[in-house]
Amino acid sequence: MSKSNTKLASRNKWMQRFISAPYVVWSIGFIVLPLLMIVFYGITTKDGRVTFDNLKMIFEPTNFSTLVLSVQLSLVSTLVCLLIAYPLALALRSLKLKSNGLVILMFMLPMWMNFLLRTIAWQNILEKNGVINMLLGAVGLPKLNIINTPAAIVLGMVYDFLPFMIIPIYNVLAKISDDVIQAAADLGANQFQILIRIIFPLSLPGVVSGLTMVFVPALTTFVISDILGGGKILLIGKVIEQKFKQGNDWNGGSGLSLVLMVFIFLCMAIVQKYDKDSEGSGVW
Amino acid sequence: MVKKILQKGYIGLVLVFLYAPILVLAVLSFNKSKSRAKWGGFTLKWYGEMLRNEKILSALYTTLLIAFLSALLATVLGTIAAVAMSRMKKLPKTIMMSITNIPMLNSEIVTGISLMILYYTISFSLGFTSVLLALTAAHMPYVILNVMPKLRQTSRSTYEAALDLGASPVRAFFLIVLPDIFPGVLSGFMLAFTLALDDFVITHFTKNARINTLSTVIYSESRRGIEPEIYALSTVMFTVVLILLVAINRGKAKVAKKNEER
């Protein structure tokens, strides 16, 4: 009996190794190693000497102001997304749908139209003779001049990344049991107290993943500013992209990427501190 | 009652915001004028032209093939990874989960660049395979995140019972574990496919000049004007998916209703 048990145990161990191996190898090859390459390029010169000049490049006035602008625009977009998505998720929750598949579908479906095209469509809506100005003109209001301004970029960011705020928050809200809310009401809490002291704390994991999933792509985008900023507004993602695609300055580009990456990880670490139970709070 | 109307109105408003650009693109696909900026009258010309446009058709083919293969690869590898990690001891599990989270926290631009540098360093030439592997790497964590919670819900003892009754581990996995986690596997696949289909940034950095996906064609044309055939093609793609999804949902609802009646 004990003999067959040890045999089973050793077989289990062997199985475990056998099925773990592919992913361990894969994640070293496609996650760890590429990151180490960026670190390597980031702290060396073209001829392979160690240097910190690439990292310091972020403090050059032009680069630094680009970073500041990127942070500002992405923070505003993230906040706007949260302000739109939270009430929406609450409203969706109160619909009491049997499966949340339909909701996720509704907000994922736009992704089947290429996101570059959808962003380009905003040009049509926003530009001087665009849809919005036509509508404004029809009711006799003055024209809006949004295209090629930071406001257009924020709008593009909000548009492109809003679903990534809605879905995680909705997923968490939909899981909150009605009993909990009923209990709070029975104990004398009013609607506002229930929202602030019961629902919101319980929804934090979803809010945190929403914040992450909007802030990171917004901070690093170079496509949205290309299309809606008219190429006049430079964001940090564009600076990095140009270093690789046009300038051929891989060391400088890696240095900037490294700084950006550390910055993002620090932001995430701060946010995650408020999110103790992060397991199962993912978007999907 | 008023609250209900307000809520529904608000949901409707956000949906209008999300779908308005799609409507604009659909309208543009019927525009006689080649320029995006002016309306030249109604035409169906571009829907015919798109079938003769070699460049767009090959980009569509590449996009669909890469999205499908990378999603498949990410799903198979990701499911195996999730099973493996669910059985790990605490420390190795924590380490592997942290590594898994990196591509999701990392911006696409850093993921794309880091893989480009890796390919360059090991002299792996850029092209179809490099894009395929890059997208697989970028989207596998989403599959793992979909499968993990389902694995936690399955009971280990049924799997062990199958082993005790003489099933091989592989057989036990396919007969016992996989049916339980299948919804997670499927949604992981759908997510990986959708993300890959819509990807531009990672493809941009890991492709060479000879290969194009729809995204990269659109990006290169975004300055001098998009060919109207692309609007037509996208409208067709979107409509097909819309119809498919509505049909699937209807079917599901019918099945659910039948089950209830029973």
Image: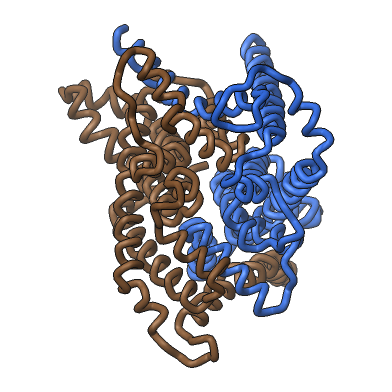
Chain colours: A brown, B blue
Quarter of the image with the C terminus of chain B is top right
Q: Residue furthest top?
A: B1
Where is residue A23 shown, x and y percent of the image?
65, 65
Front in this rendered view, residue B39 or B163: B39
Front in this rendered view, residue B183 or B28: B28
Which image quadrant is residue A261 in? bottom left
Residue A18 lies left or right of residue B218; in this view the side is right
How many labels were placed on the picture?
0
Where is residue B14 shown, x and y percent of the image?
42, 25
Note whether A119 is above or below B42 in the view shown.
below
Residue drawn at x 55%, y 63% as measured from the top left: B111
Note whether B256 is above or below A219 in the view shown.
above
Residue drawn at x 72%, y 67% as measured from the top left: B126
Observer able to see residue B225:
yes
Residue drawn at x 42%, y 20% as measured from the top left: A134
Residue drawn at x 69%, y 57% as measured from the top left: B77
Quarter of the image with the N terminus of chain B is top left
Residue A188 lies left or right of residue B50; in this view the side is left
Where is residue A87 shown, x and y percent of the image?
33, 28
Observer able to see residue A279:
no
Front in this rendered view, residue B42 or B159: B42
Where is residue B45 shown, x and y percent of the image?
76, 24
Front in this rendered view, residue A27 or A257: A257
